[in-house]
Structures are given as C-alpha cells and as structure tokens.
Amino acid sequence: MVEITRKQVIPGDVIVTGDFRPGMFVERRGNSMVALRVGLAEVVRNDVKVIPLSGAYIPRVEDQVVGKIVNLTGYGWEADINSCFVGYLPGQFVFGRDFSPATHDLTQRFNVGDLLLAKIEAFERGKDPQLSIRGPGLGKIPDGKIVKISPMKVPRLIGRKGYMINMIAETTALEIKVGQNGLVVLDGPPEGVAKAAQAIELIQQEAHMADLTTKVQQLLGAPVQPAPTGSDSGE
Amino acid sequence: MPSKSFVVETIKRNQIVESISKGRRLDGRALDQLRPLEIKTHVIEKANGSAMVTLGNTQVLAGVKIDKGVPFPDTPDKGLLIVGAEVLPMAAAYLEAGPPDEGAIELARVVDRGVRESEMIDVSSLCIKPGKWVYSVFVDVNILNVDGNLFDATSYSVVAALLTAKMPKFVLDGDVVKDTGERLPLPVHKIPVSVTIANINNTLVLDPTEEEEAVMDARITLDTEDGGNICAGQKGEPGSFTPEQILTAAEWSIAKGREIRQKIKEATGA
Amino acid sequence: MGEAKRRLIDDNGIRLDGRRWDELRPLRMEVGVVKNADGSALIEWGKNKIIAAVYGPKEMHPKHLELADRAFLKCRYHMAPFSVDERKNPAPSRREIEISKVIREALQPALFLEDYPRTAIQIYVEVLQSDGGSRVAGVTASALALADAGINMRDLVVGCAVGKVDGKVVLDLNDAEDKEGSGDMPFTFMPNLNQVTLLQMDGLFTHDEFKQAIDLAKTGGMKVYSMQRDALMKRYFSGASPEMAATSAEMEA
C-alpha cells in the first residue's frame, strides 16, 4: 500500500519536516521541505514534490506541442508555442537535406497562421527550442476548435496512461490533439466539441480535486468507474 | 491600437468568416448583438466621478477630476472638458509601457469628440469669471483588459462617469475662487452613445471582439445623441466600406444607440 | 499665520479614523482580476485601490538586453490621473520611477530569476486610488500576482507601513497621517524567511522608536500575510481550508 499525502500549498509553505527528498518545486531548508509554487504538494514515501496549478509552459525535449506559425525566416518557420520562447522549425526538417531558400519556397508547406502539431526536438542553452514534425500524427492541423488550458493542468487532462483524454475522445467521438503547452484542438461533430470543451473547462477549474474523474464522467455521460490506480496526475 | 499586432490562426480566421456568413459569430451572437455590458459607478470615491465598464472581457475605468482652471484664450467663458485614454500595458500580453501610440491617441481623440460634439456637457455654464476662471473637467480612462471594441467601452465609461460626477460649487470672493463645499451634478444635456461596427469579409458585425478585430478589414464608430442624430464618426483600419454599408451602420447605431442609452440611464440613475 | 496643527491621536490613543495605534485599516484582496495577464491581484487597503498584474516569463524586449543566466525583472508603478486629490498628469513622474525601482527590489529576493534565463518578467502596479501606503500595498498585491502567474518563489513578500503621529509609533498610516505626521516607514519582508526586502524611512525616530517601528511593522505584516494566503487559497482551492490534506491509500500498480 502506497500512501500519498496531499496538501494545498503556496510559496514559502512548509510541506513536511524530516528526512525527505525534495522534488519538483520543493526546496529543503534545514529540516523542512518548502513549497515554491501554488499547488498541491504530494508526499510519496520519501519524495516531496509540488504539482503547480499555474505557470507558463517551459519547453522540454520530446514534448508534443501545438504551435502557430507567426513568421518565416530565411531558413525556417518561427512558431508561437505559448511559451516565453519562440519555437523554430528548420526548413531542412520539412524539405530534407537539400533544402535551400534559393530552390525551396517555405510557404509551399506552411504559412503564417497555420497550426502545427509538433515535437520539441532540441532545447539547448542559449538557443530557442527547435521543433520537428517527424512522427505519427505530427504536421499541419487542418481544422478544429482550439481550447486553451493551463499548461500545468495538461497531465490532469491526459490522465494516468491517457485515461482521461481517451474517455473524453471516445464519449464525444472527437479527434483530440493535446499540446503539453496547454493548447488542445478538438475536431469532430459540434455537439461533441461543445461537450469536450466543457469537460476541459471542468478540469481547468477543478484539477486540484480528488473526485475530478467522477465529475468528468458524469458530465460526459460516461459510465462511472474508478480511474486506473496511481496518482491522478497522470505522471 | 494594437488590433493587428498578433497572429490569428488561419483555422480560426476561416471559422470566424464562415460563421459570420451564416449569420452567427463564434461566441453565438447575432451580427448586430452587443456583448454583456456592465456599468458600475462611484468606484473611485476620491474622484469627482467614476465608472467601471465591462463589455464582454474588455474592461475600462474612467475617473473624473473637476477643479478650477484657466480658460482657452479663444473661449474665455467656456469650461474645459478634456478626455484622455490610456491603454495600460497590463491590459494585453503584447503591450509594452511607453508613450501612447497612434492607436491609443486615436482612441482618446475619437471618444473626446463623441462627448464634445454631442454637447453632452454645456460648457457655457461652467464659467466662473470670464477670461480668468472656469471649471476644468478632466476625464481620464484607463483600459484594464483588452478584448476588442475599446472605442465603445471607453465612451460608455466616460459618459457614465460624467453623468454621476459631482462638481464643487465655486463662487467668487472678489478675485479669489472659493469652494463653498456644496456639491452639484454636472450640467448634462445629452447622452451620446458610441456604436462600433466592423467589416469582416464584407459583412457588418457590431461590437467586435479582439479576434474579430484581428480579422476585420475596417471599422466604423458612429455616435448618436438622444434625438437619434449622428454627432460623431470615425472610420479606421486600412480597409473600406461601401456607402450602403455606412448607411446600414448608421441605422444600427441609431437603433442600438437607443437601447444602450437606456442601459446607461438605468446604470447611472439618469 | 500659524494654524494650530490638529491632533492625530487623542488621549485615549484613538486616531482620526477611529483606529488604535496597532490597528490595520480595512483590507481586502482578490487574485485573478485581469483576464489577459498571467497573474494578477487587486488590493483594497483603506482607500487604496491597486491592481498588480504580471506577464512572464516572456520574451525579452529589447533582445540585446536579455540576460543569459536569468530573467530580466521589470516593474512599473504608475498612478492613474484620478487616483489623487489633484489630477495627476499620466506621464511617469520621478516619484513613480523611484517607487518602481524600490518595488522591484522588494520582490526580487523572493524570485528564482535563475530558473528563467533569457526571459523577462514584467510587473505592473497601477494605483487607481491612493491613500497612503500605496507602495507596500503594491508589493503585497504583486507578490500575489507573481504566485498567481506561477513564477518560482522562495516566499511571498508582504508589506506594512508604520509611522509616527503625535510622538507615537503607529501602524499603517493613512493619507492624512502620512502628510501630517512626523515619520513614515514603508516596510516589506518575506514572512517565512524573515528577510526585510523594502525599507524606506523619512521623519525622526529615536533608536527605541525605530526598534518599536520594526517590531510593529512585522506584527502588522504577518496579519496581512494571512490575508494574502486566504486570497490565494480562495482563488485556487475555492476557499477550502488551507491545510486540507487528502490521504489516499492505493494499491501499487
């Protein structure tokens, strides 16, 4: 039996005292584990971390993101990935090794205003994050309703092993693309889109509540059953 | 005004245009429907008058300061009415602090003209001593959150603040202006109402949101006063209107102006 | 000439607005009031009405000033023209520029700027109505806005001004006491770390009075801190009790 203790915290709060390992958004001060963000502190065995409930998206390599092309430079596209850093998709990654501005026209593939499902390929110190669209399902997003959620709540939206997002997609008959950067694209029949948007709003409002899964199931008219075991944070 | 300083997704742009061509907007409104409008007065007690207006998610706050002042040389017996507006840098992510840009200046001047040309306030009755002392009425608007149609929201806040303002009663004691301590309402004669209409893909829509403004080709603001007469107008943005569209816009402004005037009256007890 | 200066505190220790020497003015805070901002808070303290809004971390402009190893912290304190008795010109004054710097330096010690290299964090403090102690109110609201924005913070920062009227050290000066009193000391600190981050003083305090003032500011500040916590809890946890711990025993997967 693994016991998980949760506590609502703000920056500066002591979560627990004793011999623990400080995890994400936690600092050790003497004998105390201190929270550094507003969120839910979780103590599992010896590990203490905080699951923040607000905050900007900071790109991580391998993250799937929804990006909006905002500029074309000579050698690639710049994309707004809802972060303080602008994502960069090199022309080479799309046209291949022999890409050159002289022989290839970037606008043939993507233009300003296009939405892409992309991956953070690299994020080196001192450089902007590099995107790639090589992978299943990646590339230009043709249509759909765009919904924004706090990037910190995306794990909740996805759920453990995708439980939450799959449930939403199945009950609404939608194709759903989720960006770790807090952008979600819903594609399908309008009633399904409306329901899914409501479910996402509910998750946004109540990510910190233990009975969220049940509430979402009820909203969607899905059969009420317990979520897969483990932390609801989907990590 | 930074209405086109950010990129709207092409998908969304297409959705806006398609939805409008079917007579509805993305937020479900009819083409000539206003967003929820809320007006709260007396929010800044230190000011002589104030009004907080929310129009959808656009939020603005107007404050009135009334004092004695020196008249302009060419209008020695008329009070001063000066309307200013500042889009606070906190109001949107793409804004930076700095002197007002051309959009903010246009906003302030258009709202000012709308109030002035309607003769909402009878400035001739704001004279204390001709050539020397008059009432000076400053209205300053702070835009707190941008979501489109700053023109109308700003105008409603100015009007509501002026309608509920209390001015000091000044008297002359020889050559010295004294505050009697009594407080009076401003001499208000008209209630001008600003109505802004956007042209999106050759279709007119009333009270555009920020996304709609990013997609629009042109906008027109028309002010009407109580008699249904048009007292101010401004076309903006680099697109155009047909003369017929302008006349339709005028019809909308007169009709909607009436409804909104009623709302302003209810909110201010005027 | 020479009007008699009015008494600011009577023989029973009651001030002009009815407060005792160690009483705070009415205080209210609300988190999340500017929809577009990453974080924001409204504070109503006495007659002060102040909004703090935070954008960040965000792209740094101008780019050539970005810092390789940390965020560039910017702060703008500004008073609305209608916020004071005599209308104020909207252009930034020297006083506002100084206060902007002081507020920035009051908040910086609480922030992990190193966690956000090459970015900017922008704080806006807009005074819609001013009533003495606006800068400490601004710092208090800004700390809430920064936490709301999800910036990594060591602690909140909370403030309280103390001053001297009629020879007595008192808590939380209002506008009249600020203007007519003989000492004014804005003070902010990080409550859990016990570190002072803002101190300004003008007036005349004896050594003892100064010690009293610091003590009083800390005590008053802790009361304000509990209201900050309540405001954040209300916004994020729908007003549930701050120490609600949900323990779930689950089978290991």
Image (cartoon, rainbow, N blue to C red):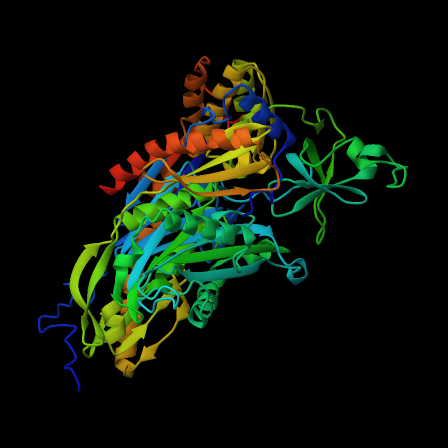
Quadrant into which the C terminus of chain B falls: top left
Asked if residue C19 shows in the view, the reply is: no
Q: Quadrant of residue C88?
A: bottom left
- Residue at the image position 64 percent from the left and 56 percent from the top: C118
Residue A110: x and y, percent?
Answer: 75, 33
Q: Nearer the viewer, residue C39 or C242?
A: C39
- Residue at the image position 61 percent from the left and 30 percent from the top: B13
Q: Quadrant of residue A78?
A: top right
Asked if residue B123 shows in the view, the reply is: yes
> Hey, which residue is sitting farthest left in the picture?
C12
Residue B58: x and y, percent?
Answer: 43, 41
Left or right of A81, for residue B177 = left
B160, above or below A104, in the image: below
> Hey, which residue is sitting farthest bottom in the picture?
C1
Q: Nearer the viewer, residue C55 or A33?
A: C55
- Residue at the image position 47 percent from the left and 26 percent from the top: B31
Residue B191: x and y, percent?
Answer: 31, 43
Residue A178: x and y, percent?
Answer: 60, 29
Left or right of B103, for residue B138 = left
C185, above or below C82, in the image: below
Left or right of C217, for residue A127 = right
Total marks in image: 0
